[in-house]
Amino acid sequence: MVQPNFELNKYLGKWYEIEKLPASFEKGKCIEANYVLRPDNTVQVVNVQTYKGKIRKAEGTAITQDPREPAKLGVSFSYFTPYAPYWVLSTDYNSIALVYSCTDVLRLFHVD
């Protein structure tokens, strides 16, 4: 189940990561994500982390894949990769959000 009656506009802004499952693309610390609505109604996603003493930034795009389920977003950080699920399971829009994501890598293994 995802957040009922999810409102993307209230979710936009800067979020700080407190806890996560291990992910090869996020090995750093002090991870933050900033979400900004673009004129075409896609969302600019900018993730920033500190890794090995350097600040690393990744920019991507989030989309609402089905307007009937606005809490189920898709996120991509490359033109060459499909949108990965980014499901907002629960949020109060101010201080906490629980998000789930998963993907299949080359159909060889599954990553949550």
Image (cartoon, rainbow, N blue to C red):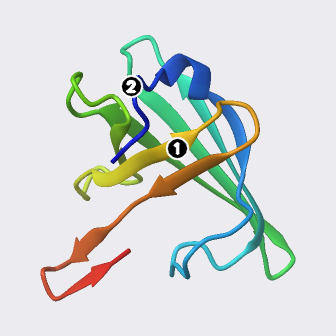
| Horizontal relation, residue 81 to residue 19: left or right | left
Which of these two is toward me, 21 or 79?
Answer: 21
- In the rendered structure, which amino acid carries the disc numbered 2? Thr
Callout 1 environment at 10 Å: few (<14), some (14 to 19), or many (20+)?
some
Q: Quadrant of residue 19?
A: bottom right
Q: Quadrant of residue 10?
A: top right
Of all residues, the one furthest to the top in this rendering is 39
Question: If you read the primary sequence from the N terminus, does the residue marked by circle 2 or circle 1 appear first?
Answer: 2
Give percent across and percent down for residue 12. Answer: 60, 27
Residue under the image location 52 percent in, 73 percent down: 25
How much space separates mark 2 and mark 1, taking CA atoms? 21 Å
- In the rendered structure, which amino acid carries the disc numbered 1? Ser
Give percent across and percent down for residue 7. Answer: 48, 21
Of all residues, the one furthest to the right in this rendering is 53
Residue, disc 2:
42
Question: Quarter of the image containing the C terminus?
Answer: bottom left
Callout 2 environment at 10 Å: few (<14), some (14 to 19), or many (20+)?
some
Residue under the image location 59 percent in, 33 percent down: 35
| Horizontal relation, residue 68 to residue 99: left or right | left
Which type of secondary structure does the marked residue at label 1 adopt? strand
